């Protein structure tokens, strides 16, 4: 099996070095590093990398995770004979034996993707990378999500411990394995206009509803050295991150909820507006939020990142 890694990096050189070391230790067929116009010396360091297994794709500007994975997936399709790709950020890396565990899985042609079990460095489950099912699939899943909240539709801790594969609908781009032929012929590439946030959930939701399955495989383990969603506060810093959370969130809710879209998003919008009270510059936050909501509702995803930053600073 020819398995290539796609790693997107931006201004985290030391973490990238660790990630590459762990990745090369898994003996992939090749590694593509997508450099999102880093300014911390990453570009210069990568230019001196001599390992024949590593290819570098330098983007002219920072396109965010969405743009980075779009470019990376496209490069793999057009320039390699890879059968599978696995993607992750520069602050994530495979545990020893992760690639081998993946290759041992019974992968029928019906399986288009595999999501790894992702942990924090201290061994806790990485909440932001916990796979899920679509809570709006049927009445049962709706009720379960309504009663259980987030854990009503996300993979439970028990599935991590059982080491049994489970069909899912959505996953993050950390430790996600995808069949390259289906990326090329069926799914296409992640939406590069989303920049960050929910781009992975949107893409994998589309994958799981294309007639192919995504499996959660707890024997395949990754580490993500990050802050979990549970630790995240209501206040966004920098503020522009709120724009992508709200705008892209509306796209995800539209995709998942279908005819229940308005029933779902109206309470969400109310909470987002209510969050104005948490910010010192309430006028700027409110303006940014309204623009994000407008763009999301009217499906406008082409607003340049530099413009989003300016809005967040005015």
Image (spheres, rainbow, N blue to C red):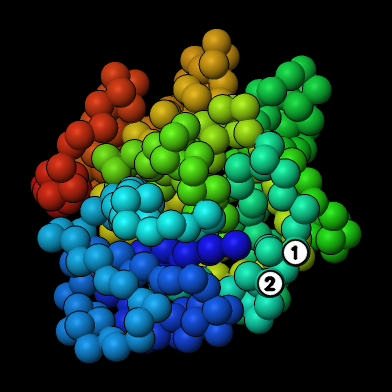
Q: Quadrant of residue 62?
A: bottom left
Residue 253 tag number: none
Q: Which mark is residue 104?
A: 1
Residue sitting nearer the eye, 251 or 42: 42
- In the image as oriented, which residue stretches furthest toward the front? 81
Q: Position of residue 9 (x, y in %)?
A: 33, 69
Mark 2 residue crowding within 10 angstroms, few (<14) / some (14–19) / many (20+): some
Which residue is drawn at the image coordinates 69% and 23% (left, top)?
Answer: 137
Label 2, label 1: how far apart the Cα atoms are: 6 Å
Residue at the far right in the pictured view? 162
Along the line of sight, the residue nearer the viewer: 266 or 44: 44
Write the residue at 46% across / 79% down.
19
Residue at 54% across, 16% down: 258
Secondary structure under the numbered disc 2 in the rendered image:
helix
How many marks can you see? 2
* Residue 172 in the figure: left or right of residue 169: left
Residue 225 seen in this snapshot: no
Viewer-nearest residue: 202 or 105: 105
* Residue pointed to by mark 2: 100
The quarter of the rendered structure image containing the N terminus is bottom right
Q: Is residue 258 above or below residue 179?
A: above
Above/below status of 112 relative to 225: above
State the image coordinates of residue 21 (x, y, percent, origin top left): 47, 86
Q: Is residue 237 left or right of residue 174?
A: left
Cβ–Cβ under 8 Å for marks 2 and 1: yes
Q: Position of residue 154 (x, y in %)?
A: 70, 44
Query: Looking at the image, can residue 216 be seen?
Result: yes
Q: Residue at x 76, y 17 (%)?
A: 139
- How many other residues sit within 10 Å of disc 1, few (<14), some (14-19) or many (≥20)? few
Q: Horizontal and vertical percent for residue 135?
A: 67, 29
């Amino acid at each position: 099996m020819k398995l290539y890694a796609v790693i997107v990096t931006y201004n985290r050189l030391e973490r990238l070095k660790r990630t590459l070391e762990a990745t090369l230790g898994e003996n992939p067929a090749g590694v593509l590093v997508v450099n999102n116009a880093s300014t911390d010396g990453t570009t210069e360091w990568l230019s001196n990398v001599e390992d024949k297994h590593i290819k570098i794709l330098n983007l002219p500007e920072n396109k965010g995770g969405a743009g980075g994975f779009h470019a990376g997936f496209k490069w793999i399709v057009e320039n390699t004979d890879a059968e599978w790709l696995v993607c992750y950020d520069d602050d994530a890396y495979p545990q020893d034996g992760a690639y081998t565990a993946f290759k041992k899985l019974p992968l029928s042609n019906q399986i288009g993707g595999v999501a790894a079990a992702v942990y924090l460095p201290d061994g806790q489950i990485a909440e932001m990378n916990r796979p899920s099912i679509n809570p709006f699939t049927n009445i049962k899943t709706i009720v379960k999500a309504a009663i259980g909240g987030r854990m009503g539709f996300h993979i439970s801790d028990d599935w991590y411990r059982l080491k049994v594969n489970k069909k899912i609908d959505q996953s993050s781009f950390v430790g996600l394995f995808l069949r390259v032929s289906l990326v090329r012929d069926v799914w296409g590439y992640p939406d590069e206009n989303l920049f960050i946030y929910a781009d992975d959930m949107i893409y994998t939701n589309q994958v799981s509803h294309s007639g192919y399955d995504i499996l959660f495989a707890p024997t395949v383990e990754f580490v993500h050295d990050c802050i979990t969603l549970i630790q995240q506060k209501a206040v966004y810093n920098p503020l522009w991150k709120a724009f992508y959370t709200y705008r892209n969130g509306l796209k995800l809710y539209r995709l998942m909820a279908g005819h229940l879209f308005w029933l779902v998003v109206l309470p969400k919008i109310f909470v987002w507006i209510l969050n104005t009270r948490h910010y010192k510059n309430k006028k700027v936050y409110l303006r940014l939020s309204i623009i994000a909501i407008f763009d999301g509702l009217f499906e406008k995803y082409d607003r340049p990142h530099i413009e989003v930053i300016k809005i967040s600073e005015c």
